[in-house]
Amino acid sequence: MIGPGDAGAELCAIAYDIGRRLAAAGVVVVNGGLGGVMAAAAAGAAAGGGVSIGLLPGTTTDGAAPDLTAVVPTGLGELRNGLVVRSADAVIAVGGSWGTLSELALAMRTGTPVVAIRSWRITDAEGAELQVPRAASAAEAVAAVLHRGESQHQSVVGRP
């Protein structure tokens, strides 16, 4: 689950719903561990009885979202975005910030399944829009990543 740390109430509500739905499906939610979309997804996962892991940029747990099940201070700053993507079997992007854009690009580059809600629209050097799978709702996004995981015989976002 990726998205901005300074997201507004509407994006946070979507992230909360996604976290809750993923938890109900038995999926472990991994994110950057801070505020906004990340905190909302962790709160949703907790409400759904699930597990969420936050990979923090700093060397301490300061600023970690309160509802995370586990917190990992990486000491890597923004480079931890790569860990978020590489530890996930699928990525759901909600909203957009520079960090979200970097994670989205890494996921697309590495072939990690991606679904975006109200997130970046990206064009190539010639101005053609790159195709990033999109969802209109939390339910649609979760169904898309769960379906991809089943069809590829892999886990989804760290499903145990």
Image (tube, rainbow, N blue to C red):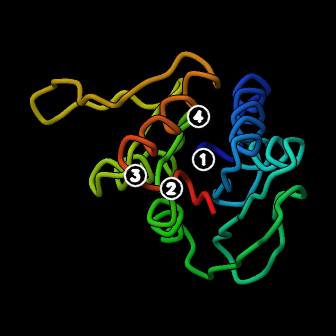
Residue type at mark 3: give it.
His
Real-space Cα separation, disc 1 to disc 3, in angstroms: 20 Å
Callout 1–callout 4 Cβ contact below 8 Å: yes
Residue under pointer 2: 155
For marks 4 and 3, the one nearer the N-term is 4
Relative to 133, does residue 26 appear above or below in the rendering?
below
Q: Residues within 10 Å of mark 1 (few under 14, many from 20)?
A: many
Residue type at mark 4: give it.
Val
Q: Which mark is residue 35?
A: none
**Nearer to us: label 4 or label 3:** 3
Instruction: Determine the secondary structure under disc 1.
Output: loop
Q: Position of residue 17 (x, y in %)?
A: 75, 30
Residue under pointer 1: 1
Q: Residues within 10 Å of mark 3 (few under 14, many from 20)?
A: few
Q: Residues within 10 Å of mark 2 (few under 14, many from 20)?
A: some
> Residue drawn 74% across and 22% down?
10
